[in-house]
């Protein structure tokens, strides 16, 4: 084979990948670089000033209000993740144990909410949890409460709505791990005298851990960047990063601070994925 043929064969994969790489570069790399540059600028009456400053990052990482913002966001995302794990694992186990002919139906029922727009689902929870929503109306009619409970415009409503929105991701992730478990291992545990409780903690849970971790990372990351659910069910009164980015960019017109906050959020998500990757490799 001639040198020209060798060079042509070496270049052909890159020629095939070139359009996709250029598209990624155009729609991802260039905007991210532009955001990074803007985050090191100052703002004055909605105008981005030239120059370089660390003011935005120093303020976000040192001011107590901003630290509270990050803590509340991380805790809220963690709460949604824990609830999705607790609610999703039993559902995933039920899908695995169901007859094969019904699994397709169960998969569809789990994934069906994903076909509905997040805004619609979130407004549904607003109608259920609102001051004149279904829950308050039932409790008032039963005489359990004398006045409507405040379940929206706060962290409670946001966590409930976030759990429902992201629960399918946890269920599908855990189901994949449970389906891969060899049933003979459970039979061996039963033969050796392990009851259902011990077999779950010694066989099922350890083998399902990869799916549980993957689902937790996915739900946690999605909730960290969620915007519609925190804004509608939490409102502007709560301290949440996505709501703060929206407020800074479109209400206060402080684009440098909004981009700096967005980049810190992106770094946090990347750190979560890095930790998950280390766990997946066993450290």
Image (cartoon, rainbow, N blue to C red):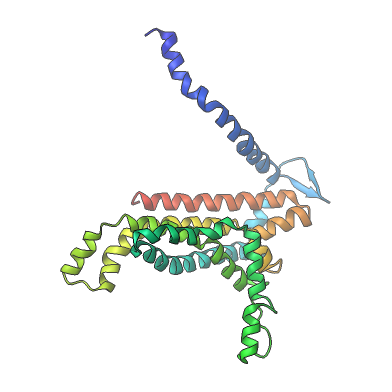
- Residue found 23% across the figure and 74% down from its top: 195
- Residue found 68% across the figure and 39% down from its top: 34
- Total labels: the figure holds 0
The answer to which image quadrant residue 70 occupies is bottom right
- Residue found 64% across the figure and 78% down from its top: 134
The answer to which image quadrant residue 202 occupies is bottom left
The location of residue 66, given as percent across then percent down, is: 65, 61
Q: Foreground: 171 or 220? A: 171
Among all residues in the image, which is located at the extreme top?
2
Q: Visible in this render: residue 64?
A: no
The location of residue 126, given as percent across then percent down, is: 66, 70
- Residue found 67% across the figure and 77% down from its top: 133
The location of residue 101, given as percent across then percent down, is: 37, 59
Among all residues in the image, which is located at the extreme left?
192
Among all residues in the image, which is located at the extreme right?
45
The answer to which image quadrant residue 72 occupies is bottom right
Horizontal arrangement in the rendering, residue 122 relative to residue 278 (left or right):
right
The location of residue 45, given as percent across then percent down, is: 83, 51
Is residue 226 shown above or below 198?
above
Q: Visible in this render: residue 187?
A: yes
Q: Foreground: 88 or 264? A: 88
Is residue 113 shown above or below 86?
above
Q: Quadrant of the N terminus?
A: top left
């Amino acid at each position: 084979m001639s040198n020209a043929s060798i060079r042509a064969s070496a270049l052909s994969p890159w020629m095939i990948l070139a359009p996709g790489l250029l598209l990624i570069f155009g729609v991802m790399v260039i905007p991210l670089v532009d955001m990074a540059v803007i985050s090191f600028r100052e703002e004055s009456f909605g105008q981005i000033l030239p120059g370089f400053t660390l003011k935005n990052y120093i303020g976000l990482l040192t001011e107590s209000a901003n630290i509270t913002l990050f803590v509340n966001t991380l805790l809220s995302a963690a709460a949604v993740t824990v609830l999705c794990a607790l609610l999703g694992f039993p559902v995933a186990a039920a899908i695995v144990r169901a007859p094969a002919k019904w699994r397709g139906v169960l998969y569809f029922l789990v994934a069906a909410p994903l076909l509905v727009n997040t805004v619609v689902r979130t407004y549904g929870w607003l109608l259920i949890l609102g001051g004149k929503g279904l829950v308050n109306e039932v409790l008032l009619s039963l005489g359990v409460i004398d006045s409507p409970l405040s379940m929206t415009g706060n962290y409670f409503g946001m966590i409930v709505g976030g759990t429902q929105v992201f629960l399918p991701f946890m269920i599908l992730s855990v189901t994949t791990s449970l389906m891969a478990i060899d049933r003979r291992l459970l039979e061996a545990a039963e033969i050796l005298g392990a009851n259902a409780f011990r077999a779950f903690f010694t066989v099922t849970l350890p083998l399902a851990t990869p799916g549980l971790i993957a689902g937790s990372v996915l739900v946690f990351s999605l909730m960290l960047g969620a915007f519609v659910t925190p804004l509608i069910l939490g409102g502007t009164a709560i301290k949440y990063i996505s709501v703060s980015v929206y407020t800074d960019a479109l209400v206060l017109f402080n684009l440098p601070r909004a981009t700096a906050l967005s980049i810190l959020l992106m770094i946090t998500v990347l750190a979560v994925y890095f930790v998950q990757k280390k766990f997946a490799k066993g450290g």
